Amino acid sequence: MPPYLALFLCVLVIVFLFREDKKTFERIPPALWLPLIYFFILSSRLPAQWLSQRLDNSLDAFQDGSPLDRSVHLGLLFGSGWVLSRRPAAFRTLFLNNWPLTLYLLYTLTSVAWSDFPLIAFRRWIRDLGLYFTIGVVVTDLDLDSALRLLFRRLAYLTVTLSTLLIKYFPDMSRGFDQFTGQASNYGIATSKNGLGAVSLICVVYLLWDSLTPHQTSKRSFRVIAVNLALLADAFWLMSLSSSATSLLCCLMGFVLLALMSFRPGGISPKAVAWIFLFALITYVPADYFLNITEVVVSGAGRNMTLTGRTDVWAEIIRMNQAPILGTGYESFWLGERIAHLWQVFFWGPVQAHNGYLELYINLGMVGIVLVFGLMCFLCAHILRGLKTDGSTSPLAMCFFAIFIFYNMTEAAIRPCNMFYALLVCALAVSSRRKARSEDARLESGDTQSRTLAGRQPGLGSRRVAFNSVPAGVRGSALVPACGLDRPD
């Protein structure tokens, strides 16, 4: 088949799937295009990279960026900010209810002051602010469950189908040779084989969750399940082509967690599954010391203990780091003389530490590690609470939380330009929104009981009148949801 005919048919399939969503979701807000575009950029390539025939991996391109990329990110930032400004209490829902995230953002902004390249660091901070705004568009929507499913569903339409198209019909844009091993690799719409593995991993976990959990406000018809299975098969095929050991192992872990929380063998609750995972995580370090678990896993994945050269990079980065407490500044380590030196030492030109915790340490220091650790504990507490009361999104949040922890052992994912960090922030915001709504439901139930009691007891009649005369805004959220989302997009 001619490549451009295949492209035309692929576009028709994507348009058809988008139109079919109208039969599944009662409401499709136009504002969801903003987070969809942003998430697609995170999952694939920057706009300037899409317009070039080959990926520009030069040092100047990495440090300076592109005017087109900055314009697109600013457009998404201002567009999302405008949407949030029209939704009452949206910023409170996104930032005040998630105070550990706000504290971390303020510290990253402050770290620009001691960066060697403050202008570049500040520019990157403004760029990354768009991530939080676009996530806010999703979590402050009137129908949270449908908004989440619609976002990730359409993201799977785009990433899976376009990756398959590029690999089969446009190899110049989607295939290359590994700079470290020299072997041929496939990266689809991403910029590396690990990027393709990460995109496939996210789609597999979401599609499994969407197929196993009941839909709250949308229809889970046979058509939806059939599309899920087709996309799942394609995503598994792409993951196998990527040869990303990290994604394969994380996919296996996510599948086991999701299956245990969905089917509940032996009557085990999802919350118990989460606690078992946390216990295994805590005992991993001492167990690895005596049993060499890491060596067994790495050997089983077909890799050596250098993790394809990663340990050499880690040693050199730790030796170069001169700011262990505060770090070099927001996204500032891989700039100037430091990255030039590393590109001279390592011929394949690393642009990240290939370890999320080490990447956080060299940019934001021990203070940044403490803040992110507190953020993850805050999220874990919300997820555990949600697994007891909410059987819809909490299992998915738990899976992505577990994957995020292990994925960062070999890839730097604690960065706003990484899709897994976006999923972590999204899980945090959704969990906080669920918690606020459950508290409002309890308050509303208590107010209803009080009004009923006042109506039945003669001596409380005057209190009922006084209560009803108080404006709704003063009474809290008894009649209005936590976010005050009474205005459509």
Image (spheres, rainbow, N blue to C red):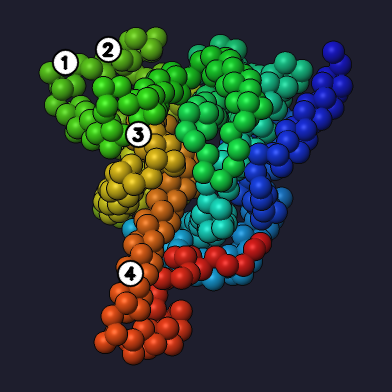
Give the labeled residue for mark 4. Answer: 449
Secondary structure beneath disc 1? helix
Mark 1 and mark 3: Cα distance apart in space: 22 Å
In percent of the image, x 66 and y 39: which residue is there? 24
Give the labeled residue for mark 2. Answer: 296
**Mark 1 or 3, which is nearer the eye?**
3
Going from the N terminus, do you reach mark 4 or mark 2 first? 2
- Indicate the amino acid at tag 2: Val
| Location of residue 301 by image quarter | top left
- Indicate the amino acid at tag 4: Gln
Structural crowding at the residue carrying mark 3, measured as other residues with C-alpha within 10 Å and reported as few (<14), some (14–19) or many (≥20): many
Structural crowding at the residue carrying mark 1, measured as other residues with C-alpha within 10 Å and reported as few (<14), some (14–19) or many (≥20): few
Q: In front: 188, or 317?
A: 188
Mark 4 and mark 3: Cα distance apart in space: 41 Å
Q: Residue 454, position in %: x, y?
A: 32, 79
Going from the N terminus, do you reach mark 4 or mark 3 first? 3
- Indicate the amino acid at tag 3: Ala
CB under 8 Å between discs 2 and 1: yes
Disc marking residue 97:
none
